[in-house]
Amino acid sequence: LSAMAKENENVYRIVALHNRTNTKDLHPEYDCLQTRIFKIIVIGDSNVGKTCLSYRFCGGKFLKNPEATIGVDFRERTVEIDGENIKLQIWDTAGQERFRKSMVEHYYRNVHAVIFVYDITKLSTFENLPDWIEECGRHAVSPLVPRILVGNKCDLRDRCQVSTSLAQRLADSYNFPLFETSARDPTEKEHVDAIFMTLAYKLKNHKPLRLKQPSECSMVHLSEEQDVQSPCLC
Ligand SMILES: Nc1nc2c(ncn2[C@@H]2O[C@H](COP(=O)(O)OP(=O)(O)OP(=O)(O)O)[C@@H](O)[C@H]2O)c(=O)[nH]1
């Protein structure tokens, strides 16, 4: 597919997802099997390994020769936590500005969790993190939406430009958990899973808000005591 055709295809998919959000009889965070669905976006510079990380989690393998993401790619994995199936819908976003500018609004809409990725072998990808975090804030993502920081390509430790202590300081300054891992290294597979499962546990335990009027059923911004944007059960 050409870049433009691919971008159009993704817009159709996004519209379909948003339409589902607006359907009253099919709740946005439940699929037809009544599995709760959580949207997680993966954000960061181009080439840091966002596609490979999400593919490792959803496909179980290292994706050889990934192409630059155009707009967004979607992957899903259903996980079982305490006897409940939950579906994690991973939005693998484009790092290149030219492939993301028309899509940015869609990325952040109704997001449940955000993963910021940098490449430990490329300092600039780490230095750009505050810009990504700021963009997220600019799109009115609630500060209560869980966010985590992931340093990828740890199989290339000998080329490391971002020390763990430096990354930890940044993570602490934002109060985000920090993970360092490798999408490529097969021995890190469980660790990659653990990153996504950490979010899955957090999201699962969010208490849904019961709204009184079904007609008003929509994503809602809750107060700090109540919790983050959560599924409402009408
Ligand atoms: N050594 C190593 N290379 C990796 C790892 N993860 C990804 N790569 C490589 O890094 C390059 C970019 O990977 P992608 O997953 O496409 O990066 P991206 O962040 O999705 O890039 P955009 O789609 O342009 O935003 C590819 O050549 C991958 O093979 C890793 O953990 N270790």
Image (cartoon, grey):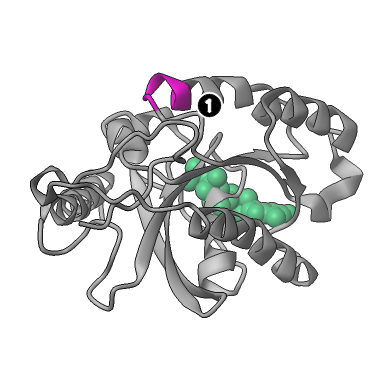
Q: Quadrant of the C terminus?
A: bottom left
Please state the horizontal and vertical placement of residue 142, each as a whole percent of the image: 44, 30
The residue where tag 1 is placed is 132
Badge 1 residue CB within 8 Å of ligand 1: no
The residue sitting at 29% across, 73% down in the picture is 34
Q: Does the magenta stretch include residue 86?
A: no
- Asked whether 126 or 65 is in front, the reply is 126
| 230 or 154: nearer the viewer | 230
Residue 126 on image: x %, y %: 69, 29
The residue nearer to you, when weighing 85 against 216, is 216
The magenta-colored residue range is: 135-140
Residue 215: % across, % down: 8, 47
Say which amino acid is labelled 1: Trp
Residue 155 coordinates in the image, percent (x, y): 81, 56
Secondary structure beneath label 1:
helix
Q: Is residue 63 visible?
A: no
Instruction: State the residue at coordinates (50%, 60%).
Output: 204
Q: Is the magenta stretch mostly helix, strand or loop?
A: helix
Residue 80 visible (yes or no): yes
Q: In this view, does 189 lie to the left or right of 72?
A: right
Residue at horizontal 57%, vertical 66%?
A: 57
Residue furthest front in the image: 212
Task: Determine whether, in the image, residue 55 is placed left or right of residue 164.
Answer: left
- Crowd class of label 1 (few under 14; some 14 to 19; many from 20; radius 10 Å): some
Quadrant (top left/top right/bottom left/bottom right) for the N terminus: bottom left
Q: Is residue 200 left or right of residue 173?
A: left
Tell me if residue 165 comes above or below residue 158 in the rendering: above
Please give the count of numbered marks on the rendered protein. Answer: 1
Residue 184, quarter of picture: bottom right
| Residue at 47% across, 76% down | 84
Q: Where 101 falls versus 29 (above or below)?
A: above
State the image quarter where residue 74 is shown.
bottom left
